[in-house]
Image (cartoon, rainbow, N blue to C red):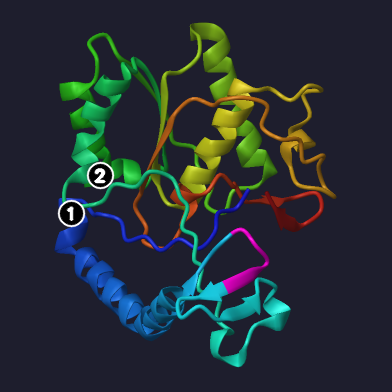
Amino acid sequence: MSRPFVFQCRGFTKSSRRLGAAAACSSASSSVKDQFRPSWLHNVRLKSAFIYNDSSTIARRDGSRGFSSSTSSMTPSSRNDPICELASSSLRFGPSSTSEIGHDLKYMNAKRILLFVDPHVRTLEPFTNVMTSIEQHAPQGHHVDIYDEIRVEPNNVSFQHAIDYATNQTSLHGPYDAVIALGGGSTIDTAKVANLYACHPPPNDDFYDYVNPPLGKGLPVPGPLTPLIAIPTTAGTGSETTGVAIFDDAPTRSKTG
């Protein structure tokens, strides 16, 4: 379920910009761009030299026949694969982009909202920005449930607690229209799991049904999930771009997902 190579530089709130986070992000972007430029230009030259077709060989632009598409028969000058695929969730970044979430919820007509946030982030400006945007722009009659019992480096116990909360609220008041995860990787992963299990409870009510083998059965997600909006407050998690959730399995003292 993991995604191919993705490089992302997210936007920051006003608070984090004052702390220099935006400058750090800009510096990282420049560093990565400079690091990959020679390889990227090399790949562009390779692409311009070949015409790709459905056969097992490649025709050069000058009409001569090139190497087979098999990497084992590539010539030394083309050892680097000239094909790069980028895939990820829809991304939005830029100053104050967090304050647009209320407009997104209005566009989705989301009235029942489940917000995941850890206790520390709940005291900071990003949380205030999110709640203000929701109050001002979300559909009339909306309701927000807040789950803040996030464990840093979540385990099977903390995941199950979040699952129980989401499942119970869904049973009592109906399904949610949107799920929001505000925080780092632990918060986003917790929101993903709670969303999955609340939408599609395991057939045998076994937590490990969706967990990767050999610890679990690795069952595929059987259907659509409630839309999840992830707002990362850390620069390096990457959890907002994948469908994977990682946790510590206490009984086996291992890390899986």
Secondary structure under tag 2 reads helix
Give the image quarter of residue 137: top left
Which segment is the magenta one? Answer: 54-58
Query: Relative to the observer, which residue lies in front, 149 or 228?
Result: 228
Query: Relative to the observer, which residue lies in front, 189 or 39?
Result: 39
Q: Is residue 162 visible?
A: no
Numbered tag placed on residue 15 in the rendering: 1
- In the rendered view, does 242 fall on the left or right side of 216? left
Majority secondary structure of magenta residues: loop
Query: Looking at the image, is mark 2 or mark 1 earlier in the sequence?
Result: 1
Secondary structure under tag 1 reads helix
Q: Amino acid at mark 2?
A: Pro
Expressed as whole percent of the image width and height from the top left, the position of residue 101 reads 26, 33
Who's the residue at 34% across and 18% down the image?
110
Mark 2 in CB contact with mark 1 (< 8 angstroms): yes
Who's the residue at 71% across and 53% down the image?
256
